[in-house]
Amino acid sequence: MGLWYSNQMPETILIVEDEPALRDTLIYNLKKDKFSVEAVGDGRAALASARQLKPDLIILDIMLPELDGFEVARILRREMSTPILMLTARDDEIDRVVGLEVGADDYLTKPFSMRELMARVKAQLRRSRLLREELASVKPETAHETLAFANLVVNLTRREVMLDDDPIQLKPKEYELLEFFASHKGQMLSREFILECVWGWDFIGDSRTVDVHVRWLRQKIEEDASEPKRIVTVRGGGYRFEG
């Protein structure tokens, strides 16, 4: 089955691959699974197609004419958050590291099975779709100069936090995380959603980063960090800020 419903447009995938045989195989299998597919064979064409098409996912080979896949990913990541699945003929760890650093979301080494590629494609599309749905459902508080929660006050204009009328020192990312929580009081926020909104799409890391910063933040704003009342863990979900 494809990843779309009868009343929705099929998701669009851009293939960037200069090997005609592999490119044709990818096109065939993706179309068979009801995706809309476009394909190009070099880096410059990839940039033009991605900007015009705005695909739901990009399958990007590293070794390309004109511009290599690393440079294509680096440029596109500054412009869009589209998931990028990189392909390479080499199994070097350095390729994987560089690919992730320039903004790829996943990495597959040739030769690969079409079943594995399809599983990776569907996983990335599902993740992207869930994040979009969460973004649409989560509504920030209306703009205020300050957000007050009993003895905790967040001054959005001055980026200052007061607890019991005393300023508390937060690292920049701790403040950004607290501001994000405070602006979405009472809403369950997944770790991935927090990571995307506070750290950004191009951040190289995982959801454990969120857990570490939440722990630091709790130590500064909770009466008892071991039994938090303000930043509550939602089992299997993420966190909810209670104020």
Image: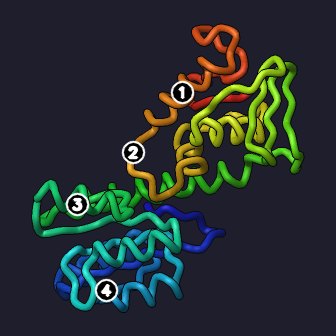
Residue depicted at x 38% and y 62%? 103
Q: Where is residue 243 in the image (x, y as percent from the top left)?
A: 79, 25
Between residue 210 and residue 83, name the one nearer to us: 210
Mark found first going from the N terminus, 4 or 3: 4
Which residue position holds label 3? 108
Disc 4 versus disc 1: nearer the observer = 4
Q: Which kind of residue does numbered mark 4 sit on?
A: Gly
Is residue 30 shown above or below 198? below
Mark found first going from the N terminus, 2 or 3: 3
Q: Where is residue 39 in the image (x, y as percent from the top left)?
A: 35, 85
Q: Residue 203 vs residue 116: left or right?
A: right
Q: Which kind of residue does numbered mark 1 sit on?
A: Gly
| Marks 4 and 2, how far apart at CA | 26 Å
Residue 173, quarter of the rendered image? top right
Residue depicted at x 22% and y 57%? 96
Which residue position holds label 4? 43
* Secondary structure of the residue carrying numbered label 3: strand
Q: Residue 236 has which mark?
A: 1
Is residue 235 shown above or below 170? above
Q: How crowded is mark 1: few (under 14 residues within 10 Å), some or many (20 or more)?
A: few
Q: Which kind of residue does numbered mark 2 sit on?
A: Gly
